[in-house]
Image (cartoon, grey):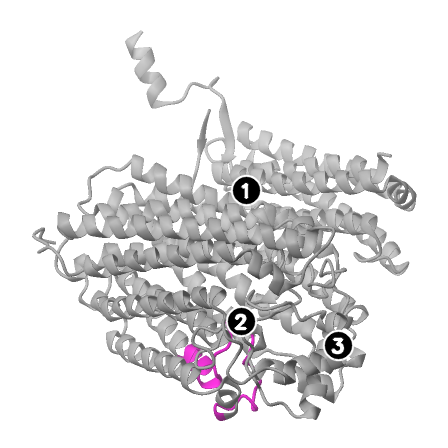
Amino acid sequence: MQFKSQAVAKPYFIAAIGLFVGQILFGLILGAQYVLGDFLFPEIPFNVARMVHTNLLIVWLLFGFMGGAYYMIPEEAETELASPKLALAMFWIFLVAGALTIVGYLTVPYATLAELTGNNIIETMGREFLEQPLPTKLGIVVVALAFLFNITLTVLKGKKTAIAIVLLIGLWGLAVFFLFAFYNPVNIVIDKFFWWWTVHLWVEGVWELILGSFLAFVLIKTTGVDREVIEKWLYVIVTLTLITGIIGTGHHYYWIGTPEYWQWWGSIFSALEPIPFFAMTVFAFTMVNRRRREHPNKVAVLWALGTGVMAFLGAGVWGFLHTLSPVNFYTHGTQITAAHGHMAFYGAYVMVVLMMISYAMPIMRGRAANDQKSQVLEMWSFWLMTVAIVFITLFLTAAGILQVWLQRASDTPIPFMAAQEKIALFYWMREWTGVIFLVGLLLYIISFFVGKGEKAA
Amino acid sequence: MIPAMTEATTSPAPNQPRLPGDLAIWIFILAEMLVFAVFFTAYAFARAKDPALFNECQMTLDRNAGAINTLLLVTGSWFVVLAVQAAHRDDKAVIARHVALGMLCGAGFLGVKVVEYAAKFGAGISLSTNTFYMFYISLTFFHFMHVILGMVILSVIWNQARKGAYGRENCHGLESGAAYWHMVDLLWIILFPLVYVMR
Amino acid sequence: MSGEFTKSMARNIFYGGTVFFFLLFLALSFDTHSQLPKRDMRDNIDAKVTEGKKLWEVNNCIGCHTLLGEGAYFAPELGNVVVRYGEEGTKAFIQARPKEGIPGRRSMPQFNFDDAQLDAIVAFLKHVNSVNAANWPPNDQG
């Protein structure tokens, strides 16, 4: 480790992995509820479990982003972090606030939680992914601002590399677009319109800058390819991302009451959204092929290549599958959306955070890379989780196609629940594949505790 | 032969094809042209679905304004070519003047376009009027914004040129900006017949 | 073919391209907001609809259902439920949910709404149904 303050990343990474486990456990509960409808009812209704599943995902990815940034920024800026103490304090605040929120979800009926936490002051709750009570939302803002202040200051006093700048823009964008979470007009169309300014402009906008920046950082470190080369391609890729992704928001404006020209604008621009993802895949593979040295941390490189491929498949290919408005007319709000969501989030964001952890954790534990045994185990976990998510996506896609046919496209459409029962087989297969994913995740955790790590840093 | 070969590797032979401008701008140009290409294809599909509507609405467009604008952009491109050639001759004094004339043509384009838009919007036509006007406004406005971006780029170049930044040894930025300006011109040359003229 | 590829040019294009497309997005959003009054039936938003939307939110209905196709995919689309079940049918359905769920089946919680609240929820759902959503959903099954 080049700078002492990089060590603040460690608790962030540990928390991220812990919350990831929680997310997957609740995913399994949800999967079970899809086939055993009253599983855990009325103690944990589906909507509560889903809220926990998605919010844990967002929170652990944020922990991963922050940890990654705290690790990367001092090394890029070539100076110690402005305030490691602030970073640690924010860690505990964020963790406690997150934990309390989850406990609130699970122990109190949502309406009561809303009442207790001042939803009457500013009504922001009860919208998908933005279910957090007002204090939690404010907490996120405070933590994000303190975090941004900390790393921005670090960059300002040190070197301003392209990788650091792209990361900063991504993180500032993340904070700015989160502010739309506080805007909830009574007019449902305007509500939905700006809801996407948080949700879409996060995952298909600024988060991709964070992804690109992390990927570029790890590629420089593990391949030894010239920084100059990697950074200029990083700029090209994030340019492609934003010129397709910003107007690509239009693919959410087809059927929510917004004017119909969005069907054209959204289709045209989002049809091009796979291009930056493809560029990212080619970028990762080219840089690894051109490597100037053999880095001992093979598994970090595997995650880097994996995120390139899986982000392209999940976000690029599975996104394109239902993004054109004539197709989306039938697939909107079906299991096709769920299929895309699972693979895109895993491929783009889960994998890039795990890549960052995989690269940084051994160094923070005093070695360049984990020993062979640990790395092999982590590779097993890579393949188990990745193959599992591919099959989950395939099963959900099959379920979605059948759902569209039965419920929407056939001459004699049948009711939603009748269609759901007919496709239950795919939900069962998805659930068992989910168990395999969990096994992969447990192996991932075990890989931290095996082997001795004989290679000195 | 050996000295010749080593010489060839140290400085590229003058007849070797060279990409003018920066690779980055060419990637951007390619991406932009791809967006337009998809847009034009969408237009073709939409038109094939309802040719009667498209024919009828096309009649309402001001073809003279379109033709004048075509002339303006082609002239603008020509001035920018002159600027690049002047740089290659190392004739630094006239570069800025040619760039300024190119910008003047661009400004003329924007002016004509604003008059045209004023007439259309004044008649209550909007993106939501029908599919044809949706395409007409989308395509031309998307292009309109590109002209503005092109002008911003040219103004940066003009400023640099006045400081004498460009010459035979340094025309990288000038060539990059010129390439972008030519793209804006080229796109209009496709757009104009497609939307205004072709039935 | 040889050519130069500089980081500063790539950076400038990144900034320029981003600003350009964001401005374009703002322009389209601006136009959208000028068109919305014709589509979102805002004149019909009264105290009841407002109350209904709040009830929709604080009970996290979106955690199972979709509304205009957005939400969870566990339970039926509700943007057109008033067409499918009728206003009274919708109220009756919400009221009839057993507290302990239905054995083996996906179960909706019993929220114990009073009559005024049920009216508000249905008013909200009716309002959503009246929004011009480009003929979505494809049929009454949602």
Q: Mark 3 points at which residue?
A: C126
Dot 3 and dot 1 residues touching (CB under 8 Å)? no
Estimate how packed mark 1 is, as few (under 14), some (14 to 19) or many (20 or more) residues with alpha carbons within 10 Å. Answer: many
Q: Which chain carries label 3?
A: C
Frontmost of labels 3 and 1 is: 3
**Residue drawn at (66%, 44%), measured in percent from left and top?**
B100
Answer with mark 2 or mark 3, whichever residue precedes in sequence: 2
**Residue drawn at (46%, 46%), measured in percent from left and top?**
A313
Q: What residue type is labelled 1?
A: Phe
Instruction: Check the image and report above or below for C10 versus A83.
Output: above
User: Looking at the picture, how far across and down is residue A375, in whole percent?
Assistant: 19, 50
Frontmost of labels 1 and 2 is: 2
Q: Residues under labels 1 and 2: Cα distance?
A: 51 Å
Q: Residues under labels 2 and 3: Cα distance?
A: 25 Å
Quadrant of res A65: bottom left
Q: Name the residue under label 2.
A: C106
Callouts 2 and 3 on one subunit: yes
Instruction: Report whether residue A350 is seen.
Output: yes
Start-end of magenta stretch: A116-142
Whether residue B33 sits left or right of residue C15 in the image: it is right
